[in-house]
Amino acid sequence: MQVNLNCRHFPGDRPCLFHKRDQTVCRSCSHFEEVGERILIVKLDALGDVLRTTCLLPSLKRRSPDSHITWMTSKAAVPVLENNPYLDETLTMSAEGLARFQVESFDLVLNPDASKRSSALASLANGRDKRGYVLGENGQVRPLTREAVEWFELGARDDLKRMNRKTYQEHLHGICGVRPASQRIVLRLSEEERRSAGRFARLAGLGPETRLVGFNTGASSRWPRKRWPRERFLDLAAALRKIFDGRVLLLGGPLERETNRWIAATSGGFAVDSGGDHGLRGYFALIDLCDVVVTGDTLGLHAALALGKRVVALFGPTSPWEIDMYGQGERIAAEMDCICCYRTDCVKSPGCMDRIGVETVLDATHRALECKVPTGASVEETMLAPAG
């Protein structure tokens, strides 16, 4: 055969880039790269969890530089993985993806998600070495390692979850049996995505020198209690206006349109509404415009950290200790015994997010504006906000 099937550049059903560009053929091609270890990652959702799981990729490439890494995910999460330099291929839960999934063989299958759906896929995958979770014949999820058992138990017991002080990144690497490299979340924007965000900024009257504080005002529909009240965001904008010569950029998607329009209209023009209709990659590019991002524990938090932004992160029903801030900011939570309850409803009034005061967030934002992101800094200690 005159085609090298084991070159990572050969797509299989058409000429490779180098042949189209230079008419190079396999027998004399200097770009040949043999595929080594074949690795499959199964991580379907949620979007924020998919993004923060990308911290595993640099560690895998350091362990096996010539590896071919395939990621099985949901269709909604595909944009999160776009332009990722460590990924060779992304499969989705489509007919084509599932068909290939059951035919191809892998040297290593990693499933860090204890959901039955992900664990069933890991069980079906043709893999010599499997780590994380699989689904047993009795329909129950089965952890494969001691580290997987630890994370499994944290998910099953609120008291253990509340006592945990290891970050998700630490748990993830332990579950997958991989020594950590940087543990950084990987999110790479294209030049066109950056240019598109720049065009929006110019049309919104934001010059290249305008300093921006991003307000990521929303949370997923599953976790409404993660949201800081919109009135608090408005008050924070008013307080910032007195001490800050920049502007506020309101970030979010379709679920945040009404909230962001209200804040923009009520702020007297200091807060700029991004519109919520830029798509997921456009949303990431808008975050990249900001110097500092104020956000709850949601996708925007992980994106801001991945993009090297200074971050003020607000926590209530979820664990602040599992979030690695990479030395880029502060974590704020109210002083309540029930913090990290992982409840979607609450009978307490005021609730945990309501108890995070504007002055506390303002002070943290001001500190973030004064600081540059340190290189290789350690995780900050959690700052607890006074009630009220």
Image: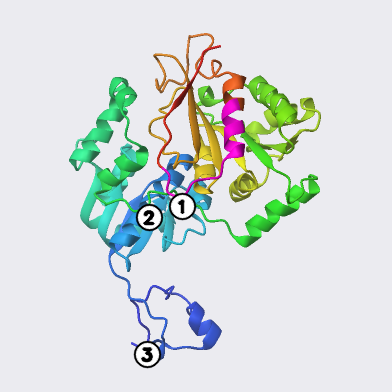
Q: Nearer the viewer, residue 191 or 237?
A: 237
Q: Residue 42, position in %: x, y?
A: 35, 49
Q: CA distance from mark 1 to mark 2?
A: 8 Å
Q: Which residue is mark 2?
A: 57
Residue 60: image quadrant is bottom left
Q: Please report the residue visible at 41 percent of the width from the left and 23 percent of the height from the top.
A: 342
Q: Please report the residue visible at 43 percent of the width from the left and 26 percent of the height from the top.
A: 318
Q: Which residue is mark 1?
A: 186
Q: Please report the residue visible at 32 percent of the width from the left and 30 percent of the height from the top.
A: 165
Above or below for 235 versus 14 = above
Identify residue type, mark 2: Leu
Identify residue type, mark 3: Arg
Label 2 crowd bin: few (<14), some (14–19), many (20+), radius 10 Å = many
**Image quadrant containing the N terminus:** bottom left
With 65 as the anchor, is 317 left or right in this view? Answer: right
Q: Nearer the viewer, residue 109 or 313?
A: 313
Above or below for 20 versus 44 = below
Q: Range of the magenta residues? A: 363-377
Identify residue type, mark 1: Val
Outermost residue, bottom side: 28
Report if the CB atoms under discs 1 and 2 are less than 8 Å apart: yes
The numbered disc on residue 249 is: none
